[in-house]
Image (tube, rainbow, N blue to C red):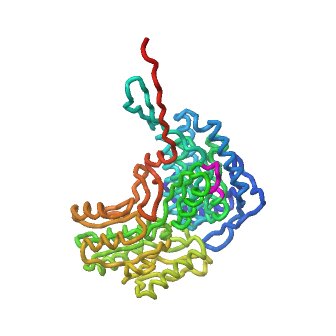
Amino acid sequence: MTTTRIPDRAEWLAAIPSLALRTRLFIDGTFVDARAGRRFTTENPATGQPIAEVAEAGPEDVDLAVAAARRAADDGRWSRLNPGDRKRLLIAWADLIAAHNRELALIETLDSGKPISDTATVDILETANCIRWHAEATDKLYGQVAPAPEGIVATITREPVGVVGAVIPWNYPALMAAWKMGPALATGNTMVIKPASYTALSLLRIAELASEAGIPDGVVNVVPGPGGSVGEAIGRHPDVDCLAFTGSTEVGRRFLRYSADTNLKRVLLELGGKSPQIVFPDVSDMASVAANAAIAIFTNMGENCSAGSRLIVHRSKREALLEALEAELERWPVGDPLEPASRVGPLISRGQMETVLDYVESGMGQGARVVTGGEQILRETGGYFVGPTILDGVRNDMRVAREEIFGPVLSVLEFDTERQAVALANDTPYGLAASLYTDDLHVAHRVARDLRAGVVGVNAYAEGDNTTPFGGYKLSGFGGHDKSVHAHDQYTETKTTWITLRPRD
């Protein structure tokens, strides 16, 4: 059901026993066990308790999945389907995802710790919307006729690259998969997808829904398992023609090496970030800035590659903004992610929680002051909760200002001039996103132009929508962008056909 009403916690808890979790690999249109029989435990980060045992793929399972995708690519069951028919099947799939919104939202909240208010109203519905948006473009992508010499017809057409491997992160399990699946499938490719081991359950169910929608066997294959074996096997596989990855810069480098060592497959990387939010002294609505700044860093517990983790504020506005932020945090309760009122849930794992707390300790050791948060809370639940954390007095040479924390930690830095603000914002190896807040249109245009980031929000934290590309500069991206019609090009090959006409008799 796609009703806007969010059930209460008791209703979500009552629905858990009826969940039929899919825990086997999805290959060639059916669920199968891993060839080696291995399984791993996925746990609920809100309680630390196990949810299910999931089949753990190995390289031999990747071989089977790629072989299925290769057959489906080569025999044309998908790529040579009428574009209108491909569109119809993708839309049917999107409709099924939306129809199963509550089921998928509950699965994703249990598996990832994301608040149910997010998964039920944003993540799953946006997953369906993303696939539907790209589906609608399937029969609207035109080729070209080149201005060739007399007697020649030269066409420029797009063809699917073939088999696309995708490696998906745990922070947005369904939506990040859709960002890859939408354009790759709309352009006629087949796919082998590795979800993160932490969060494989929703994508396995979504793959099953693809089959129910009528998408042919072998077009969508899902192989959960460790990145060190399954991810590498996909990255090195000679029958994978393109690799799309969202995750850390360190792992992104590995995929470039895998490609260089094997078949030079196309590699598309959406990587980390350390995104700045600049607040200029002319801003009049400090409450709005605080609300957007909180959304930028505390949504999804800060486990977001484009999280606005560096708040660069004019010295004259620092105290007022900190006051506004502390007031804003009253609207960000931390708690059980199945409670609709909760806006902040647990971090994905104990290890991630310890990493975040280590960063806070490092910041304090280098001279930063904890304004709020910075500690594990709700220990009695067994979950991995860290409250929204603000560090004041941060310098740009501190670890907390330079390294991606991937947690609800906001670092506050000061500036005096516009040039200094831009320099601080750009003084990072990353360049994924940025935000700026000003009432001066001239400042807005100047600074937006000067920021070295792939997505810039003005007077709002924004990543755009399905119509706009998403990707970064510097260590934040390589080879392409997610979203928009621009994403279609990276999953296709460009073919020139040069036709010589017979001369007139």
Query: Visible in this render: residue 503?
Result: yes
Vertical order, 361 against 474 (above or below): below
Q: Compare residues 337 and 64 and report the one nearer the observer.
A: 64
The image quadrant of residue 385 is: bottom right
Q: Compare residues 23 and 481 and report the one nearer the observer.
A: 481
Q: Position of residue 165 (x, y in %)?
A: 60, 52
Q: Residue furthest top?
A: 505
Vertical order, 35 against 430 (above or below): above
- Inspect the magenta stretch and tell me whether residue 234 lies in it: yes
**Image quarter (top left, top right, bottom left or bottom right) of the C terminus:** top left
Q: Position of residue 426 (x, y in %)?
A: 35, 69
For the magenta stretch, what is the residue range? 233-240
Q: Measuring 25% from the left and 60% from the top, which residue is drawn there? A: 445
The image quadrant of residue 472 is: bottom left
- Inspect the magenta stretch and tell me whether residue 365 lies in it: no
Q: Compare residues 503 and 451 and report the one nearer the observer.
A: 503
Q: Measuring 64% from the left and 39% from the top, which residue is drawn there? A: 74
Q: Measuring 52% from the left and 50% from the top, which residue is drawn there? A: 128
Q: Is residue 452 shown left or right of residue 491?
A: left
**Numbered-mark total:** 0
Vertical order, 281 against 262 (above or below): below
Q: Position of residue 317 (x, y in %)?
A: 27, 77
